[in-house]
Image (cartoon, rainbow, N blue to C red):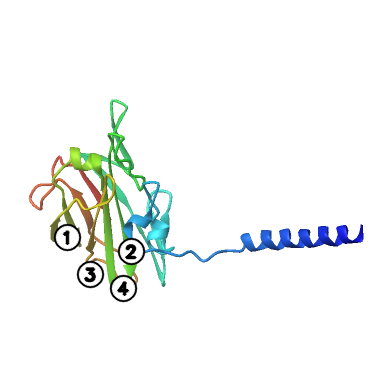
């Protein structure tokens, strides 16, 4: 009987210790590989920016290393401005989202930025529907959108494509809290932005 009680106590201690260990906070191991940022086709911006970026009510908040700033996203579908998503006759046509579904028939795109010291990198994502329905895509960026580059459909996961650019640090003030200009992605050129399908990060 005494041995049974001792064994029961030992088992209880082992179970309690195991529960405690399993519930200890773990350090997150971040990755610099874009394919690792995708969780079930959803871009985890917190993970991608090593815990510095998260979604606010209607924008992307960025904090860390003495920086506190926000980025807003808006879209235009064939010249029609929208925030979040665009519908026509109650049909969803285009969506600015971190959740990219390459098979849903909806044009999906997303942009976020990551600040590392004096370098500001922007990551631009589109899905297969963007490639099929928008096609040739350019990127314009800077304080006055003075830079231009063709979007290359570099596949990082089946039906999901990403490009990265170095943003113009000069469009930010010293502590990054204020910025002007931004990044535009779509079927545009410097001379033709009217009635186009684009996403703007600013």
Look at discs 2 and 3 and give the one toward the viewer. Answer: 2
Disc 2 designates what residue? 114
Mark 2 falls on what kind of element? strand
Q: Residue furthest top?
A: 89
135 with respect to 70 (left or right): left
Q: Distance between the residues labelled 2 and 3?
A: 15 Å
Disc 4 designates what residue? 174
Q: Distance between the residues labelled 1 and 3?
A: 11 Å
User: Picture quarter containing residue 132?
Assistant: top left
Disc 3 designates what residue? 170
Residue at 16% x, 58% y: name it.
145
Disc 1 designates what residue? 144
User: Horizontal and vertical percent for residue 193?
Assistant: 13, 46
Mark 3 falls on what kind of element? helix
Q: Looking at the rendering, in which quadrant would you find the N terminus?
A: bottom right
Q: Are marks 4 and 1 in contact (CB under 8 Å)?
A: no
76 with respect to 100 (left or right): left
Q: Can residue 79 be seen in this view?
A: no
Look at discs 1 and 2 and give the one toward the viewer. Answer: 2
Residue at 33% x, 42% y: name it.
84
Mark 1 falls on what kind of element? loop
User: Picture quarter containing residue 127?
Assistant: top left
Mark 4 closeness class: few <14, some 14–19, many ≥20 residues within 10 Å: few
Mark 2 closeness class: few <14, some 14–19, many ≥20 residues within 10 Å: some
First-in-chain label (4 vs 2): 2
């Amino acid at each position: 009987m005494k041995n049974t009680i001792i064994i029961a106590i030992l088992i209880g201690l082992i179970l309690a210790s195991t529960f405690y260990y399993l519930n200890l906070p773990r350090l997150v191991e971040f990755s610099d590989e874009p394919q690792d940022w995708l969780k079930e086709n959803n871009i985890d911006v917190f993970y991608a920016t090593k815990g510095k970026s998260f979604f606010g009510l209607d924008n992307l908040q960025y904090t860390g290393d003495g920086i506190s700033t926000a980025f807003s996203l808006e879209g235009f579908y064939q010249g029609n401005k929208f925030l979040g998503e665009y519908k026509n006759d109650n049909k969803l046509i285009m969506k600015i989202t971190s959740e990219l579904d390459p098979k849903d028939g909806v044009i999906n795109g997303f942009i976020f930025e990551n600040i590392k010291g004096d370098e500001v990198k922007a990551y631009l994502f589109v899905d297969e529907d963007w490639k099929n329905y928008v096609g040739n895509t350019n990127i314009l960026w800077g304080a006055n959108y003075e830079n231009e580059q063709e979007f290359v459909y570099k596949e990082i996961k089946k039906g999901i494509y990403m490009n990265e650019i170095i943003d113009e640090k000069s469009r930010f003030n010293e502590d990054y809290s204020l910025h002007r200009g931004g990044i535009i992605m779509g079927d545009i050129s410097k001379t033709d932005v009217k009635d186009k399908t684009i996403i703007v990060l600013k």
